[in-house]
């Protein structure tokens, strides 16, 4: 059986990582010191470098002591060692203190933030038995199909109509000598959150010259990024491409500033609003004519990759770019028109045949009320009590971030800043609520695309106008211990909430070795054209040979027969399916999802399995502590 022995390597890898990172940061700081005239580091700088190393050490020695048997419905935090949490707290405190040093230590802030990302997003991959999150296995199946066949089957699955990410994954997997993405897919959250830093840094520095505000915004993004779309997925990759496009436009394609209209004291509120709306941004960074053309070509190619890779991200990109162009923040004016043409060509010519045969995917267009999550429209949450708590914390976290962003925006307005550009980008995605429900996930996707700019405004609560700061003496600027304390406390609160918002449903996302081994056994015995049915949903089944089997979910076809067990109806369903070989897959993780998300009793699938075996129409062919496989024998 194929396994992923991350836990056997983590202690050696983590300690090696500490030594490598320490050597690297020493080299960087030495080089930086040489460029500045070789300033000797003060005691505080050495301490602020040692604290992250201490945090990494606490993290590395704690990983092997974590046992997932202790995890309950509160998620990963119920199983984590207190030393891991203490290490993260040390990192956050050291980051806040470094942020308020008299001189901004960019290399030290970057090192601390990288350490935070590493612990936040690598921990599940190092302590869990197999790559987490069932959709990763489906994405492995897409990639495997392309690797085996060198092409896609547009009629087989919707994602084969937007195959860019999977084609690149297949190319990389083959070039790296791997047979499946599952070898490395668990590291995707770390990788994506690291590469997000680059374009977000460019975006924030295009909005403000206050480097402290920039770095705090980057930290806030990591501590509020709970939506979990940074797993090995097209949307995780395409969010990076979206940030790259926005960064290019804000850095090099801003409209030239015009003379600002001066209003008298008697100006009306409407006049003040339009004056604010027309207030110019800062001048774009200067580049040559051919360089500008080259950047524009790169931007168009990046958008082409987005259109080629994901059905939803092009719409977010189009709305954001259109808002910037319409309100004369960026140019060229024809860019949104070209984007519409590219999207129309792909969606009509390439994906059109599939969409025409699956009209239900477009049925919710224009229905705003139905596109909102039912938990908001009805005020009722499904699932068990602990999941209700997690869902409530997530909703509260989103509302809190947006409230802090609103207050931060008001503060910047009072300081004389004209932040129409980040406001447009923060709000650009909300019109999509009237377009499509996207499986009930659209509001979460809107939160993700608005999050960088909401974090910027939230971080603005802690800093004054950058121009005003620049006029103050250095010592006076750093003499605000209350600000350091406030940033520290706020960051620690966000960190504590992060464990619940990000990993509160980790029992649902967890994939055990026993479940994984059961899936591999099923693939070994099932002949081609077999009908494989999940008892509930999101079992890690279609990880390879995607077109070899027909894979279905019993709760999608016969929801009432599963929720209110109707054994006869299920037997009749299999008798009429027309397949010579049919199997039902049961696992403990499916039952956890049924209980946590569906509010079902904890023995729902066990009773269903027992009822099916009593009919004599099914035979138990495989069982371990976490999974069972039933074969329909008619």
Image: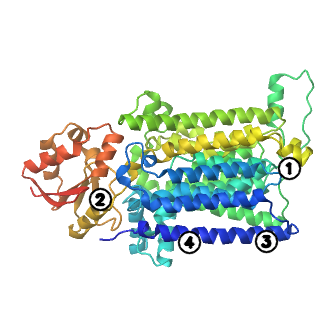
Q: Residue furthest front?
A: 43
Q: Residues within 10 Å of mark 1 (few under 14, many from 20)?
A: some
Q: Who is closer to the viewer here, 251 or 14?
A: 14
Label 2 residue SS = helix
CA–CA distance in space, label 2 to label 1: 59 Å
Q: Which residue is labeled 1 in the image?
A: 256
Contact, mark 4 vs mark 1 (Cβ under 8 Å): no
Instruction: Return the residue at label 4.
Output: 16
Question: Can you tell which of label 4 and label 3 is closer to the viewer?
Answer: 4
Nearer to me, 534 or 477: 477
- Residue behind mark 2: 515
> Which residue is rendered at x = 28% and y = 53% of the image?
552
Q: Is residue 330 in view?
A: no
Task: Name which quarter of the figure residue 32 lies in.
Answer: bottom right
Is label 4 in a helix, a strand or a loop? helix
* Residue under the image location 78 percent in, 36 percent down: 412
Residues at marks 4 and 1, CA–CA distance in whole angstroms: 50 Å
Q: Where is residue 615 drawn, in percent x and y?
A: 7, 48
Residue at image location 38% in from the left, 62% down from the top: 130
Q: What element carries label 1?
A: loop
Label 3 SS: helix
Residue indicated by mark 3: 31
> What is the quadrant of the N terminus in the image?
bottom left
Whether residue 157 can be seen here: yes
Coloring applied to the structure: rainbow
């Amino acid at each position: 059986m194929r396994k992923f022995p991350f836990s056997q390597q983590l202690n050696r890898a983590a300690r090696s990582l500490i030594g490598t990172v320490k050597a690297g940061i020493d080299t960087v700081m030495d080089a930086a010191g040489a460029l500045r005239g070789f300033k000797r580091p003060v005691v505080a700088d050495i301490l602020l470098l040692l604290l992250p190393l201490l945090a990494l050490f606490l993290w590395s020695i704690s990983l092997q002591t974590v046992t997932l048997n202790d995890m309950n419905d509160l998620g990963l935090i119920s199983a984590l060692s207190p030393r891991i949490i203490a290490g993260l707290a040390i990192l956050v405190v050291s980051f806040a203190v470094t942020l308020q040093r008299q001189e901004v230590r960019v290399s030290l802030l970057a090192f601390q933030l990288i350490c935070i990302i590493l612990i936040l997003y690598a921990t599940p991959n190092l302590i869990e038995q197999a790559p987490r999150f069932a959709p990763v296995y489906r994405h492995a199946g897409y990639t495997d199909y392309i690797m085996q066949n060198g092409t896609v089957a547009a009629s087989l699955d919707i994602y084969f109509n937007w195959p860019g990410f999977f084609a690149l994954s297949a190319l990389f997997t083959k070039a790296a000598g791997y047979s499946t993405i599952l070898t490395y897919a668990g590291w995707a959250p770390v990788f994506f959150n690291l590469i997000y830093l680059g374009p977000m840094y460019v975006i924030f520095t295009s909005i403000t010259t206050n480097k402290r505000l920039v770095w705090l915004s980057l930290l806030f993004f990591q501590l509020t990024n709970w939506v979990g779309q940074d797993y090995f997925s097209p949307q995780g990759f395409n969010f990076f491409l979206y940030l790259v496009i926005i960064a290019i436009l804000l850095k090099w394609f801003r409209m030239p500033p015009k003379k600002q209209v001066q209003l008298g004291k008697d100006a009306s509120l409407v006049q003040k609003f339009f004056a604010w709306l027309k207030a110019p941004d800062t001048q774009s960074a200067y580049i040559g004519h051919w360089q500008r053309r080259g950047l524009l070509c790169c931007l168009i190619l990046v958008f082409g990759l987005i259109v080629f890779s994901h059905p939803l991200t092009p719409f977010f990109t189009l709305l954001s770019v259109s808002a910037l162009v319409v309100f004369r923040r960026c140019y060229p004016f024809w860019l949104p028109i070209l984007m519409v043409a590219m999207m129309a060509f792909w969606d009509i010519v390439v994906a059109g045949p599939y969409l025409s045969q699956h009209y239900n995917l477009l049925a919710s267009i224009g229905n705003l009320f139905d596109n909102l999550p039912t938990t908001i429209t009805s005020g009722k949450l499904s699932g068990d009590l602990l999941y209700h708590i997690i869902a409530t914390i997530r909703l509260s976290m989103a509302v809190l971030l947006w409230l802090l962003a609103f207050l931060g925006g008001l503060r910047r307005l009072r300081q004389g800043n004209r932040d129409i550009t980040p406001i447009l980008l923060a709000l650009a995605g909300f019109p999509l609520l009237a377009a499509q429900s996207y499986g009930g996930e659209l509001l979460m996707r809107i939160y993700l695309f608005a999050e960088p700019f909401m974090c910027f405004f939230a971080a603005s609560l802690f800093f004054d106008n950058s121009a005003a700061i620049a006029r103050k003496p250095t010592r006076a600027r750093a003499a605000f211990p209350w600000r350091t304390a406030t940033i520290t406390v706020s960051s620690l609160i966000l960190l504590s909430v992060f464990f619940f918002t990000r990993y509160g449903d980790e029992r649902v996302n967890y994939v055990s070795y026993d479940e994984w081994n059961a899936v591999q056994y099923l693939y070994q015995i099932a002949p081609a054209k077999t009908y494989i049915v999940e008892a509930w949903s999101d079992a890690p089944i279609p990880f390879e040979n995607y077109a070899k089997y027909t894979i279905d979910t019993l709760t999608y076809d016969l929801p009432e027969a599963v929720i209110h067990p109707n054994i006869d109806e299920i037997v009749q369903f299999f008798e009429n399916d027309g397949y010579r070989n049919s199997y039902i897959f049961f696992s403990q993780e499916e039952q956890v999802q049924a209980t946590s998300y569906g509010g079902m009793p904890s023995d729902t699938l066990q009773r269903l399995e027992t009822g099916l075996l009593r009919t004599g129409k099914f035979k138990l062919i495989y069982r371990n502590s976490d999974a069972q496989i039933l074969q329909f024998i008619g």
